[in-house]
Amino acid sequence: MTLHTAKRILVTGGAGFLGSHLCERLLGDGHDVLCVDNYFTGTKNNIVHLMDNPHFELLRHDITFPLYVEVDEIYNLACPASPIHYQHDPVQTTKTCVHGAINMLGLAKRVRAKIFQASTSEVYGDPEVHPQTESYWGHVNPTGLRSCYDEGKRCAETLFFDYYRQHKLRIKVGRIFNTYGPRMHPNDGRVVSNFIMQALQNQPITIYGDGSQTRSFCYVDNLIEAFVRLMDTDDDFLGPVNLGNPAEFTIKELAEKVVEMTGSKSELVYKPLPADDPMQRKPDITLAREKMGWEPDVQLKDGLVKTIGYFKGLL
Ligand code: NAD
Ligand code: UDP
């Protein structure tokens, strides 16, 4: 006989792009989900379909302030993720990363919850090692426009490991590479949402720089599977572990693909490259394969079909 293993799970940033998919998944797995969000970049529209579920609870709260709840697991996703959003109020971004992590780690310590941190490939900065492995310490500008996010997330990782060493917390740190899919914010300035929105409206496709910079794009469903698997690994596996799809594309290739798939009349236009924009990014996912038996299987083309469908619905 198997015992019912429903857990009380807190998802911070649960009304955002990734958070809303995670809440949906955890409810589907039979858990009780507490979604905490201050709606800075997230929206109730992302989770409105979950609100009738008695196992789903929603709390408007800013994680830079302490939170007192009783839970078994915490997924800490709260933080604006797109450059225009996290640069809008950089001091608040650092506070969310650092004070937010301290508050959520403090909560985990009090209730002895297991805690996952949504870290990022940005901890590698503009990497000199390619593809990026977890042992690479990164090449990050500490004083630039992206630093509030990059250094904030690096400090959050430090805090997680210190809480592990000092307080024996059960921690899981996942370094997320560029992820896309339905419920991305249409105006968040990220490359996939920008290109699709521009293509669907026959507006110029804005390529920053010459478009030779690369990114590796993971479809959201694959990433959410990785979150859940990472949380379920043995307590002695802490990460950091890269979570992303190693298939690498230039930004120009992505633009051409989106134009072709939408049948758009848009032209490609070239704009200046933003400061500290990484030239290349591709995860080495050997560790995730080994420890979690995880491998993303959604091809860019298939993921784009679903994402384009979502944005069409919005227009
Ligand atoms: P998102 O902006 O859609 O979601 C972030 C959510 O956090 C939003 O709902 C926002 O309102 C909420 N939030 C922000 N500050 C908060 C605060 N102080 N208190 C409470 N809620 C707050 O972004 P996303 O793409 O879903 O990213 C989720 C997490 O994953 C972030 O931590 C991000 O850094 C990380 N990540 C995402 C990607 C990606 O490609 N999507 C890549 C690397 C890392
Ligand atoms: N980018 C672009 N045109 C856009 C938006 C982004 O060429 O309209 C580029 C951007 O300069 C970067 C890449 O696409 O090189 C990915 O940008 P995004 O903001 O999505 O994520 P990040 O830089 O954080 O990986």
Image (cartoon, helix red, strand yellow):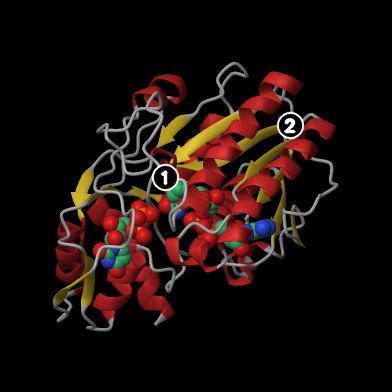
Q: Disc 2 or 1, which lies upstream in sequence?
A: 2
Q: Assess disc 1: are there few (<14), some (14-19) or many (≥20) residues with their C-alpha within 10 Å of its C-alpha.
A: many
Q: Where is residue 266 in the image (x, y as percent from the top left)?
A: 17, 79
Instruction: Give the position of the N terminus as an image quadrant.
Output: top right
Location of residue 210 with respect to 10 vertically, above or below: below
Instruction: Give the position of the C terminus as an image quadrant.
Output: bottom left
In the rendered structure, which amino acid carries the disc numbered 2? Answer: His
**Residue 313 visible in the snapshot:** yes
Q: Nearer the viewer, mark 2 or mark 1?
A: 1
As drawn, is 263 to the left or to the right of 285? left
Q: Residue at x 19, y 67 (%)?
A: 261
Marking on residue 122: 1
In the rendered structure, which amino acid carries the disc numbered 1? Answer: Glu
- The image quadrant of residue 138 is top left
Q: Position of residue 293 (x, y in %)?
A: 41, 25
- The image quadrant of residue 231 is top right
As drawn, is 311 to the left or to the right of 31? left
Distance from the alpha carbon under mark 2 to that under mark 1: 38 Å
Q: Position of residue 183 (x, y in %)?
A: 47, 65
Q: Are marks 2 and 1 in contact (CB under 8 Å)?
A: no
Location of residue 148 with respect to 41 vertically, above or below: above
Marking on residue 4: 2
As drawn, is 220 to the left or to the right of 227? left
Q: In which quarter of the image is ligand 2?
A: bottom left
Residue situated in front as seen by the camera: 237 or 292: 237
Q: Which residue lies furthest to the front in this view?
A: 143
Q: Where is residue 249 in the image (x, y as percent from the top left)?
A: 20, 49
* Mark 1: C-beta under 8 Å from nearest atom of ligand 2: yes
Residue situated in front as seen by the camera: 93 or 131: 93
**Residue 18 visible in the snapshot:** no
Residue at disc 2, secondary structure: loop
